[in-house]
Image (cartoon, rainbow, N blue to C red):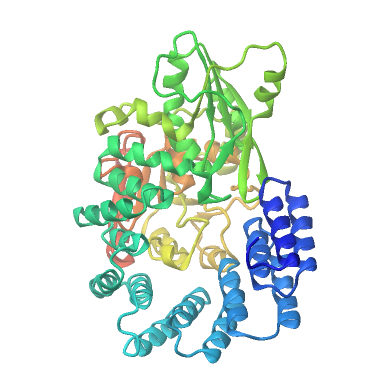
Amino acid sequence: MAGLSNSEATSLRLVRQARAGAGAGEVKTLLSKAWEHCKSSKKVLTAVTGSLVDIGEDDAAYAILQDAIVHQGESEALYQIIGEMALRMQIASVAEKAFSRAFDFNPGEPSHIVNLAESLKLGDKPDAAINLLQSSLPHFPDHAGMWNSLAQLTLHHLADRENALIFQQEAIKHAPKSAAFLHNMALMHFAQPAAQPYYEKALKLAPRNAQIHVSYALYLMGRGDLEGAWRHYEYRLDPELGYTKAASYTHGLPAWRGNSLAGKSILLCAEQGIGDEVMFGVFIQKIIDEAEKVYVGCDPRLVPLYNRSFPAATAIAFEDSRNYRYRRRSFPDVEKAFTTSAPRIDYAAPLASLPRYLANDIARYRGYKGGFAKADPARLKEFAKHIGAGERLKIAISWRSGNLSQERQRYYLDASAVANLARMVDADFYVLQYSYTEEEAAALEDIANIHFFDDVDLKKDIEANIALLQLMDVSVGPPTATQMFAMAAGCPVALVNKGLPWTMFGSTQMEATFAPGSRYFDFTDEAELLPRLASHIMQLSARD
């Protein structure tokens, strides 16, 4: 390789070999060899640690970064690398120290300020990040990255959308060909028509950017343009989105693209989170009605439920493995038959691709109903005995996603709001929030009409969720997996969210896929929301 020493060339060859598709263990071994062979090269350091972070080996990457300080000595470039890797590993304290040291070496480099602000934001120091940017911008008024960072902090920390839009426009003025900054501006406009031109400009500049395509798809869903939305939503399958967001299927079957399934067999492939699986499960019966044989590839936790709910199909569990930084998803129970004389399956389709062909407008989507999940009779009996009979309304309650980043917090209620709601309504509340914290439990446990299922792992035990929800009168909570389970169980939902979620497809009317009696509640603060929620619940009680 031109410009490289022999040792650098050898190490980078090992890195390429690791990235070419070795198993996780072999990747780590090859990368360790690459570092040991050439500890003096920053190119090797960047390639090795970046690859380790790609495969989730953060501890190994961190150890090499520390080793690099010993072997390469302190420098602006080294601390820049350490800071970038620390940001990727979400180690705020290390990133903050590294970028501070890089800034000490070169105070005139504005990218160090932007990166330091990102580190402070990651470390839950948004005020310090804002102050840093505001004090630095007079010295670097034309730096688009600073304006972009200030815009994001102003929107997500200060909830000041008016000024955030002004700052984001400054970022675009100084970097008009930045697809990322145009994308951020589109996101700031949420589902409003003003977002559309920014999405279009961003995609013109970056036509293969899967993240922008997926964001645009969600925007179009929020506008009710399902035909355009499903087309862009296909980019969610791009493996370049990373291990946690997309899977590459190993089955090798032809893709189903809406053609006739008469006399044909098809494998429906699970994707995304379990809430998405269940949400798009409303289309499974339609495929069963049209095809000769259907295999439903799903999360292992759903296999017994789907075999019971769709007896004419065969539910099979997926298995995931890592191929460098990509997720490989297989369905061993059917794929092993491909090597025998058994006939191959005709088609395969990712589950969330079904509506592209079955429901490309709102009217058609509303033809698909929830309530398809059939609870385990033994679990129903078990929980019915635990809950007991009685005339009081039974309410399932959850309040947030399990993925509670700082930016997402503002969309959800907190446990104290749940406690206040329970005090306002003469009903029994059953906590179906999975992975709640000790602090959240403490806010609720002394309220007599709030009940926990301490012996049930709600994250793993999907059968318990479905059975419990079929015993509830209403499920109250945000658009998370719990409400998708309620939809599947036929339990009415009071959907609570700041802003219309994309899953509503631009309409506040829920009585389509969701059970009759479901309702959407937008809110700006707890004080104005809780009386409306309480009134809705009491009306349900009176109706019964």
Kindly give the residue lying farthest to the front in the view shown.
2
- On screen, 237 above or below 161? above
Residue lying at 75% horizontally and 76% vertically, measured from the top left? 67
Give the image location of residue 175, x and y in percent. Answer: 31, 69
Give the image location of residue 470, x and y in percent. Answer: 48, 35
How many marks overall?
A: 0
44 left or right of 438 in image: right
- On screen, 390 above or below 369? below
- On screen, 106 above or below 168? below
Q: Quadrant of the N terminus?
A: bottom right
Name the foreground residue: 487 vs 95. 95
332 left or right of 216 in image: right
Task: Determine if residue 388 is in view.
Answer: no
Give the image location of residue 259, x and y in percent. Answer: 40, 17
Residue lying at 37% horizontally and 56% vertically, measured from the top left? 425
Residue lying at 44% horizontally and 14% vertically, measured from the top left? 261
Name the foreground residue: 186 vs 399. 186
Name the foreground residue: 371 vs 29. 29
Give the image location of residue 232, x and y in percent. Answer: 36, 41
- On screen, 105 above or below 319? below
